[in-house]
């Protein structure tokens, strides 16, 4: 985890400094936002895209935010582009307040999308975040992997028929899991909803 004294100052864009986004709530952060600028959130990207509030390379640790700051985090189709998954998840944990809500979208391990993009570093399964949830078997067996702790509060799948379609019903997700174990391209991406487990 980062030493608070070593956290660099945030590199604010002209957009942020000018107050062009007055509704920014410091307790919500959108990591790797790209062009998907969310009003009321701190939008972070490595590129100075119009609407981005803080320009920062997410592979450079620590991130320029104090610990226990955010109550909501969004990271959509970003984690697969970063080289160190565990370190990144630990940094999300550091900047989150106790009980914070984290939403992460990642590609499924045997979907075509995961291998099509040449900048993807890794893929994920429905069990990848179980290593951070102390109620799950993988975390119980290997608690030394990371000190970051989350509860996997929800999990949804995306299928693709022209565009992504979200699947949330339990029976449909079970059917997709069964099919995805034997066939490629059944589940294309996943949404994980995590709750931060941290003492106040």
Image (tube, rainbow, N blue to C red):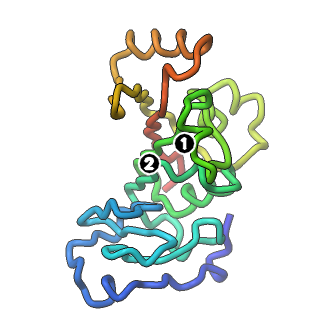
Assess whether mark 2 and mark 1 are in contact (beta carbons under 8 angstroms).
yes
Relative to 35, residue 108 above or below: above
The picture quadrant where one finds residue 157 is top left
**Camera-side residue of 166 and 197:** 166
Tell me where residue 95 appears, x and y as whole percent.
52, 63
The numbered mark at residue 81 is none
Relative to 159, residue 45 above or below: below
Relative to 146, residue 183 above or below: above
**Camera-side residue of 176 and 114:** 114
Residue 89: tell me if it is visible. Answer: no
> From the viewer's perspective, is 185 left or right of 162?
right
Q: Earlier in the sequence, mark 1 or mark 2?
A: 2
Badge 1 element: strand
> From the viewer's perspective, is 155 left or right of 39?
right
Tell me where residue 76 appears, x and y as whole percent.
44, 49
What is the spatial separation of the Cα atoms under label 1 and label 2, in whole angstroms? Answer: 9 Å
Residue annotated with mark 1: 150
User: Number of labelled discs?
Assistant: 2
Residue plotted at (38% across, 55% down): 72
Residue plotted at (62% across, 34% down): 128
Q: Which quadrant, please, contains the N terminus?
A: bottom right
Residue plotted at (76% across, 43% down): 145
Residue annotated with mark 2: 102
> From the viewer's perspective, is 57 left or right of 159?
right
Tell me where residue 50 appears, x and y as whole percent.
33, 76
Residue plotted at (35% across, 65% down): 27
Q: Residues within 10 Å of mark 1 (few under 14, many from 20)?
A: many
> Which mark is nearer the camera, 1 or 2?
2
Tell me where residue 2 appears, x and y as whole percent.
67, 69
């Amino acid at each position: 985890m980062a030493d608070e004294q070593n956290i660099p100052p945030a590199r604010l864009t002209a957009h942020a400094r000018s107050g062009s986004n007055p509704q920014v709530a410091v307790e919500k952060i959108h990591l790797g936002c790209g062009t998907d600028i969310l009003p009321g959130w701190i939008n972070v990207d490595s590129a100075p895209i119009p609407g981005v509030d803080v320009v920062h390379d997410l592979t450079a640790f620590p991130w320029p935010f104090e610990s226990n700051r955010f109550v909501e985090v969004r990271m959509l189709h970003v984690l697969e582009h970063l080289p160190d998954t565990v370190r990144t998840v630990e940094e999300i944990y550091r900047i989150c307040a106790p009980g914070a809500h984290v939403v992460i979208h990642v590609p499924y391990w045997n979907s075509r999308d995961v291998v099509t993009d040449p900048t993807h570093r890794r893929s994920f399964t429905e069990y990848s975040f179980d290593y951070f949830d102390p109620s799950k078997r993988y975390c119980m067996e290997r608690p030394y992997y990371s000190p970051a702790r989350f509860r996997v509060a929800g999990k949804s799948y995306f299928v693709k028929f022209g565009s992504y379609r979200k699947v949330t019903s339990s029976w449909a997700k079970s059917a997709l899991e069964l099919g995805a174990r034997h066939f490629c391209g059944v589940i294309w991406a996943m949404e994980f909803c995590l709750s931060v487990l941290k003492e106040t």
